[in-house]
Image: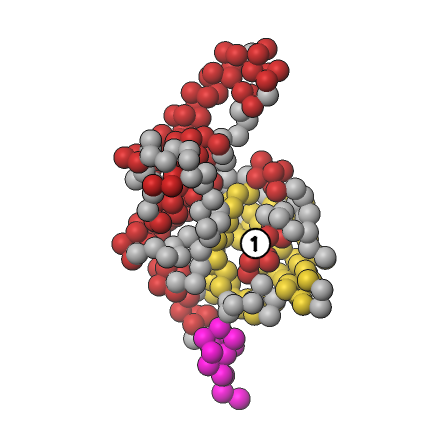
């Protein structure tokens, strides 16, 4: 369980004259919730985009579950089991919660007209399997009572939960969560933390970018700190919070010489 499922070595990405990632090294263990924190402009979002295939790095390597996925297309990375959520929930507003979840179900023969016509029974069986999975995920995330509601009618917190549910429908081995409790009240933030902890306890790996330090402190170990596109340090939340380099780079306090 301690073997890394994700390894990043020397990841570099420039945008014109701006160096967003400057040789980033990072690893995520199986069965862990790893936080990636740092000040604004540290490169966290760019790292997520390179890992998930949204943009290609200029240099470096991303290895997931033993395979080199550097520069692979996002759909191939998702099918391999590395799935990300987004800070702004991207559900389709006019579809119900159930329909939004079903969209993320993998291996749907009904998506191909030819396959659906040639093997309609198999397509129906897969649809039933995915529907059952969607209903179970909704129940797990306390979304059962809004399962038939349009996504547009959900509260901000419910949309965050639906975003996690959509990611779970893709059957991930590793979840990348982008600010899962941003704009969420403390009660729902604690509920989301509980859901993530249960996923970790079941063996799933999670890499989370989050600015709410109470959430990070209560859930994440290790905590990786970035600054200026580079790895700065990692450890428990208490360890990194006491590190003078972190206080200078992240908390705005200068370390004593």
Give the total of numbered labels: 1
Measuring 45% from the left and 41% from the top, which residue is drawn there? Answer: 91
Figure coloring: secondary structure
Q: Is residue 83 above or below residue 59?
A: above
- Look at the image and give the residue range highlighted in magenta: 244-257
According to the image, label 1 marks what residue? Answer: 48
Badge 1, how many Cα within 10 Å: few under 14, some, many 20+? Answer: many
Query: In the figure, 241 relative to 166: above or below?
Result: below
> On screen, 201 above or below 58?
above
- Residue reaching furthest to the bottom: 257
Percent across and percent down for residue 69 are 66, 45
Viewer-proximal residue among 86 and 77 = 86
Q: Could you tell me if residue 221 is visible in this image?
A: no
| Left or right for 67, reference 218 | right
Q: Secondary structure at mark 1?
A: helix
10, 170: nearer the viewer: 170
> Does residue 152 show up?
yes
Residue at x 41%, y 25% (from the top left corner): 131
């Amino acid at each position: 369980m301690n073997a890394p499922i994700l390894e990043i070595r020397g990841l570099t990405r420039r945008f014109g004259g701006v160096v967003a990632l400057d040789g980033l090294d990072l690893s995520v263990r199986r069965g862990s919730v790893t936080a990636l924190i740092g000040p604004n402009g540290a490169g966290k979002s760019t790292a997520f985009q390179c890992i998930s295939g949204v943009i290609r790095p200029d240099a470096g390597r991303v290895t997931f579950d033993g395979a080199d996925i550097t520069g692979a297309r996002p759909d191939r990375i998702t099918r391999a089991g590395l799935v990300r959520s987004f800070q702004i929930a991207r559900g389709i507003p006019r579809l119900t919660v159930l329909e939004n979840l079903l969209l993320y179900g993998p291996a749907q023969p009904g998506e191909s007209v030819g396959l659906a016509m040639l093997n309609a029974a198999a397509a129906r069986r897969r649809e039933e399997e995915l529907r059952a999975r969607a209903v179970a995920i909704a129940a797990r995330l306390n979304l059962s009572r809004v399962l038939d509601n349009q996504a547009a009618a959900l509260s901000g917190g419910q949309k965050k939960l639906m975003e996690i549910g959509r990611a779970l429908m893709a059957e991930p081995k590793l979840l990348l969560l982008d600010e899962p409790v941003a704009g969420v009240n403390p009660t729902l933030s604690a509920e989301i933390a509980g859901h993530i902890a249960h996923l970790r306890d079941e063996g799933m790996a999670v890499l989370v970018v989050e600015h709410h330090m109470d959430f990070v402190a209560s859930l994440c170990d290790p905590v990786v700190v970035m600054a200026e596109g580079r790895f700065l340090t990692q450890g428990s939340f208490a360890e990194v919070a006491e590190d003078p380099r972190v206080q200078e780079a992240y908390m705005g306090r200068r370390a004593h010489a």
